[in-house]
Amino acid sequence: MADSSGKKKLLVLGGGPGGYPAAFEAADHGMDVTLVDQDPQPGGVCLNRGCIPSKALLHVAKLITESREASHLGVTFEEPKIDLDKLRGFKNGVVGKLTGGIRELCRARGVKLIQARGSLLNSTTAELKHADGKTEKLSFDYCIVAVGSRPAMPPMFNLGDPRIMDSTGALELADIPKKLLVIGGGIIGLELGQAYACFGSKVTVVEMLPAICAGADRDLVNPLQKRLATQFAGIHVNTKVKSLKATPEGIVAELEGEGVESPQTFDRVLLSVGRVPNGKGIGLETTKAKVTDRGFVEVNKKMQTADPNIFAIGDVAGEPMLAHKATREAKVAVEVILGEPAEFDNLAIPSVIYTDPEVAWCGLTETQAKEQGIEVNVVRFPWAASGRAQAIGRTEGLTKVLFEPKTERILGMGIVGPGAGELIAEGVLAVETAAVARDLAESIHAHPTLSETIMESAEGAFAQATHIYRPKRK
């Protein structure tokens, strides 16, 4: 089925952070590539309605916070004024530049970019439905399914009222509500909740589990929670939302939790209770590929489905639903198609909560070590001992490193503080390359920087960290 030049034909369904890197990688290796995405602009949820626009808003929110907190340093600004039209324009401009860049890279690489909804008719044929209703058939040798996920919307909350938003609606920034209820204390809820709080909303977070960011290390979440407690009107854990009711005065929420006032009325509600993979409804049942009840496409470490012609990557291929994981899986899938001995065997997939302070971790966590019975040596370096953290007035941070006791091999790293998402890359490299404590401790880190906290954490695995003294136990 290759074209007249003998090139293998690849169809990529989905133009997000898994799909377009897969298309580019395949084109770079001489394949005939067609990239199909139903959005007007490529980039997927991450670029159009997720990672990028949310970070643009969080950047502005951080500027507002820093301007207010500068008075502690002897510098006073007037209270910030928000021009919503300009703020939306900034956010949309960032998205537009990046989507335009992807479109241009498609042209430069010879990737055919088609705006349509693609569905499989069999293992070698797809149907493309265009926005005008016209359809066409496309044959291929291989297909990489990278159709991503969508925000979960439990039926009990789906009242058809625009004041009840998912993350997509919240990023449209229609207005700054006086009172905002965030249902779900996970990453998305906290990031957008903090942005709205900085813009002026009174934000209340409700989480049904015993803690916010339940999957993250408590040592890392605690400094974040302390800061959020000063910014939010309330953070209620072990609390359920029994019902929502739309009224002219607002959305009335019936809440159930110890010491929680109920009912309460909010101007808007942000629903952030997870995401649903898009594996169903795209014709995979016409192939040998298998889809779970939840909508995940079953794959092996080579990103292959049960159908030899069909691969799946990204959110639709399983947890964790992270853009950078999708990009790595894209490279693996294309290499396997090209006959290379590749598989997804990464040990450290970094996770980042882009709040202020940021929370980031990779590799083994202390909780996982306890659950799996793995003996670890844990070293914590408080940022109060960091000269750079003191200089910028952000001493609430912490760097935490887990080592194997006998070999001092680095098994995991966690960081909370400004820029943690940037700093965690060193931890990813250390875990992936099986680095040991001395590798980090004896690598010179620039002074004064926050990265020194990683070096000194490593020192603590076999000696005393320079700026921390802990009496030895007798």
Image (cartoon, rainbow, N blue to C red):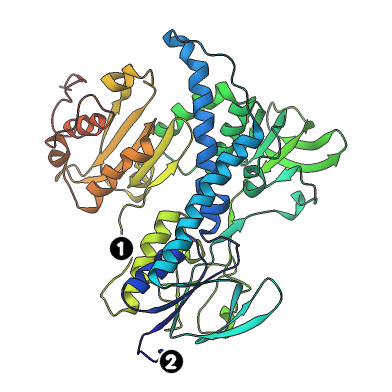
Among numbered discs 2 and 1, the one appearing first in the sequence: 2
User: Looking at the image, which is closer to me, 248 or 25?
Assistant: 25
* Secondary structure beneath label 2: loop
Which residue is farthest right? 248
In this view, the mark in front (2 or 1)? 2
How far, Cα to Cα, is label 2 from label 1?
31 Å
Q: Residues within 10 Å of mark 2 (few under 14, many from 20)?
A: few
Query: Vertically, is 114 above or below 447?
Result: below
Q: What's the mark number on residue 345?
A: 1
Front position in the image: 167 or 154: 167
The kind of residue on which mark 2 rests is: Met
Q: Is residue 212 visible?
A: no
The answer to whether 71 is drawn above or below residue 336 in the figure is: above
Rendered image: mark on residue 414? none
Q: Residue at x 65, y 34 (%)?
A: 84
The image shows residue 430, relative to residue 289, as above or below, that is: above
Residue 180 rendering spot, x and y as whole percentages: 69, 33
Residue in the picture at 37% in, 73% down: 27
Specify the amino acid type for callout 1. Asp
Q: Residues within 10 Å of mark 1 (few under 14, many from 20)?
A: few
* Residue for badge 2: 1
- Could you tell me which residue is drawn at 56 percent across and 53 percent down? 48
Q: Secondary structure at mark 1?
A: loop
Instruction: State which quadrant residue 4 falls in.
Output: bottom left
Q: Is residue 126 left or right of residue 368?
A: right
Q: Position of residue 62 (x, y in %)?
A: 50, 28
Q: Nearer the viewer, residue 128 or 367?
A: 128
